[in-house]
Image (cartoon, grey):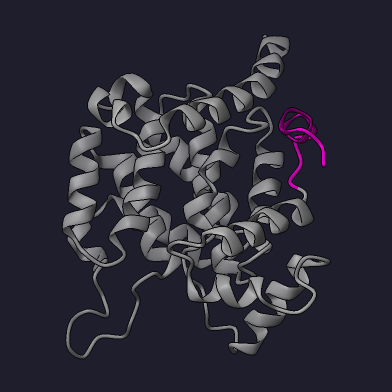
Amino acid sequence: MPSTAKRLATRFVNPQDVGRRLFDWMVSDGRGIGGLTALVLRFPGYLADPQTAARTVWEATGHNSAPNGAVMRTSVLGVWNCLSQKQVARNAEQGCLVTHADPRCVASCVAVSLAIRTAVMGQADVEAAVDEAGARAAEYDSEARSVVESSSRDLALMKLDEGLNAGEANRIGYTYKTVGAGFWAFRTASSFIQGISDVITQGGDTDTNAAVAGAMMGARLGLSGIPARLVEGLADRTLLEQKIQALLAAVEPQLLTDR
């Protein structure tokens, strides 16, 4: 298997490589694994062709399943190969399709990854970044643009806890709920803590919603905008920093060359 540095240097998502790593994670740990992801990873022939397995499982559900398991892991793809909007979108798409075939899931991953890309590239105009992400995501699912655009409204109107109250359809874990929360924080939050707290307070799939919101705010605010106590208290901090350095080692030469 190629080293981490070599895999990162290719700048392209390899579905079989990602699929193998997800499968190994499920077998060795799998904490918090979603129902759809588990079905896909256990599908016969998954390791040989993850995307076909994911599509087959999605079709068997009647094309109705669009959970947030893919968008919660997509943020790093906004950093990798960040000079190319086209490649960021392509990597987000391919990374999503190894488990989630629904166009809403793909659009979610593309929107979030592109917004993060513009933030880490230093684009100060948040609304322009939002418009760009929404327009590109709409190429995968037309509803995505309205989800992104409506994220400027009152967070409570998104009903992130929809499905926990009597008489409501179950939307807990729905990908567009998470995308809405993420873009709300990206556009509106005055601080990292305030954004995370407000998203969590709304209830629903709080850990995933806050994870996406945190990734998007982190890209916009930078490390200096995240309270030091949150960074210093990270579990497995040393391992995470090693992975970050490997990613930066692949990204930085590209940025320096461009300059």
Task: Mark yes or no: residue 154 visible.
Answer: no
Q: Classify residue 8 by image quadrant.
A: top right
Look at the image and say whether residue 7 sits in the magenta stretch: yes
Q: Is residue 25 left or right of residue 212?
A: right
Seen in the picture, residue 192 relative to 228 is either above or below; the reply is: below
Residue at horizontal 37%, vertical 49%? 211
Q: Bounds of the magenta span?
A: 1-13
Residue at horizontal 55%, vertical 64%? 105
Q: Is residue 132 left or right of residue 157?
A: right
Seen in the picture, residue 64 relative to 87 is either above or below; the reply is: below
Indicate the position of residue 215 as horizontal and vertical percent values.
41, 40
Q: Is residue 36 left or right of residue 11?
A: left
Residue at horizontal 51%, vertical 73%? 66
In what quadrant of the picture does the N terminus appear?
A: top right
Residue at horizontal 45%, vertical 65%? 175
Seen in the picture, residue 139 relative to 128 is either above or below; the reply is: below
Indicate the position of residue 151 as horizontal and vertical percent values.
32, 53
Indicate the position of residue 65 as horizontal and vertical percent values.
52, 79
Task: Count the numbered circles shown.
Answer: 0
Task: Mark yes or no: residue 84 visible.
Answer: yes
In what quadrant of the picture does the C terminus appear?
A: top right
- Residue nearest the viewer, comparing 204 with 244: 244
Look at the image and say whether residue 234 sits in the magenta stretch: no
Indicate the position of residue 102 as horizontal and vertical percent values.
60, 72
Q: Classify residue 127 by image quadrant.
A: top left
